[in-house]
């Protein structure tokens, strides 16, 4: 496995792969790898000849009071785990190359960037869209693999790829969970024992909504209430939002007469950790 930190070296390496007829898959990450990330890497290996995983804690997607400085960066351990999972190249650029002095160009996906998580994290999705497009331009992947846990991110990147006529194929892989249902996340390590005990309620609430939907319920208010009823049992977190929206414009649905996303976000009381999760009812992204 190669470790590349230079943008020009990564571009040249990708060109070499392409000239050899090798298809490239990209898995963008911020490191602190867990089994969810590694499952994306395995998906990439199944679909393409060469798997590139980026490891870059992107400063432009963090707000001023968020955890950029404290975000875990176990780089050597990450590289070992990536190599074991079949990664061919780790691309770990330095901030100065990704955002050279005077950098002023950003990507904003209008009307989506301020929905759901974007409402409380202004600028977050602008940072996500910008860095992902930069990775696409540097790595030139045929395929890019993302996890569905960040559903709005997936919808937003799908919109960006369509609007900007990008040729990369986007693959959205199912959320990988702990045995108790908690979606895997690098931020799970922040949780206290009490917060960790309550955290599986996120998925339990989503399962409640799915069970009602499968039984024929289509009223979004009743589906939402079924989720909130579960979350009301927690003493460790407060609800930021529980929303049921469509998969294109991310607008609230009153009735699920088409595919809908049930998206949730909570904040824990002790560590102020933000946890998100979702399920899609009646379709796929």
Image (spheres, rainbow, N blue to C red):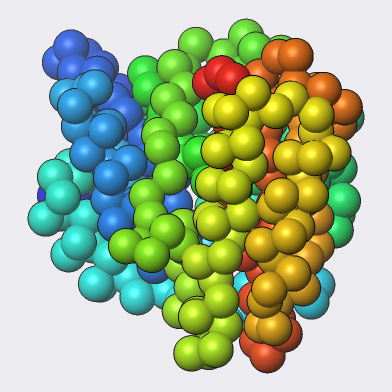
Residue 232 lies, with reference to residue 99, above or below; the image says below
Q: Position of residue 146 (x, y in %)?
A: 46, 37
In-front residue for pair 192/170? 192
Residue 61 in which image quadrant: bottom right
Q: Is residue 151 visible?
A: no
Please count the marks in the image. 0
Residue at the (46%, 67%) spot, across then down:
186
Tell me which residue sits at (27%, 50%) in the image: 38
Which of 188/69 is in front?
A: 188
Determine the image quadrant of residue 5.
bottom left
Q: Position of residue 25 (x, y in %)?
A: 31, 29
What residue do we see at 74% from left, 25% from top?
218
> What residue is drawn where x is 41% and y is 37%?
174
Q: Is residue 163 above or below residue 207?
A: above
Vertically, is 245 above or below 159?
Answer: below
Give the vertical position of 37 relative to 229 (above or below): above
């Amino acid at each position: 496995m190669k470790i590349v930190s230079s943008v020009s070296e990564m571009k040249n390496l990708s060109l070499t792969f392409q000239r050899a007829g090798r298809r490239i898959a990209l898995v963008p990450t911020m490191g602190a790898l867990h089994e969810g990330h590694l499952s994306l890497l395995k998906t990439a290996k199944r679909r393409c000849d060469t798997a590139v995983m980026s490891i870059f804690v992107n400063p432009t997607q963090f707000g001023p009071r968020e955890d950029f400085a404290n975000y875990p960066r176990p780089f050597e351990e990450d590289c070992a785990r990536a190599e074991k999972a079949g990664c061919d190249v780790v691309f770990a650029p330095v901030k100065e190359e990704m955002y050279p002095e005077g950098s002023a160009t950003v990507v904003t996906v209008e009307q989506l960037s301020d929905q759901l998580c974007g409402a409380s994290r202004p600028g977050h999705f602008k940072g996500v869209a910008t860095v992902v497009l930069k990775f696409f331009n540097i790595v030139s992947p045929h395929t890019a693999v993302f996890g569905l846990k960040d559903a709005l991110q997936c919808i937003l990147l799908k919109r960006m790829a369509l609007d900007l006529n990008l040729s990369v194929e986007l693959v959205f892989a199912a959320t990988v969970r702990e045995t108790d249902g908690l979606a895997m996340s690098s931020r799970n390590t922040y949780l206290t024992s009490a917060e960790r005990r309550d955290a599986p309620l996120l998925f339990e609430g989503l399962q409640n909504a799915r069970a009602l939907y499968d039984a024929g319920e289509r009223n979004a208010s009743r589906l939402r209430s079924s989720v909130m009823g579960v979350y009301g049992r927690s003493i460790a977190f407060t609800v930021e939002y529980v929303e049921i929206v469509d998969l294109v414009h991310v607008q609230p649905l009153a009735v699920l007469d088409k595919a809908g996303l049930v998206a949730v976000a909570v904040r824990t009381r002790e560590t102020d950790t933000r946890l998100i999760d979702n399920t899609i009812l009646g379709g796929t992204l």
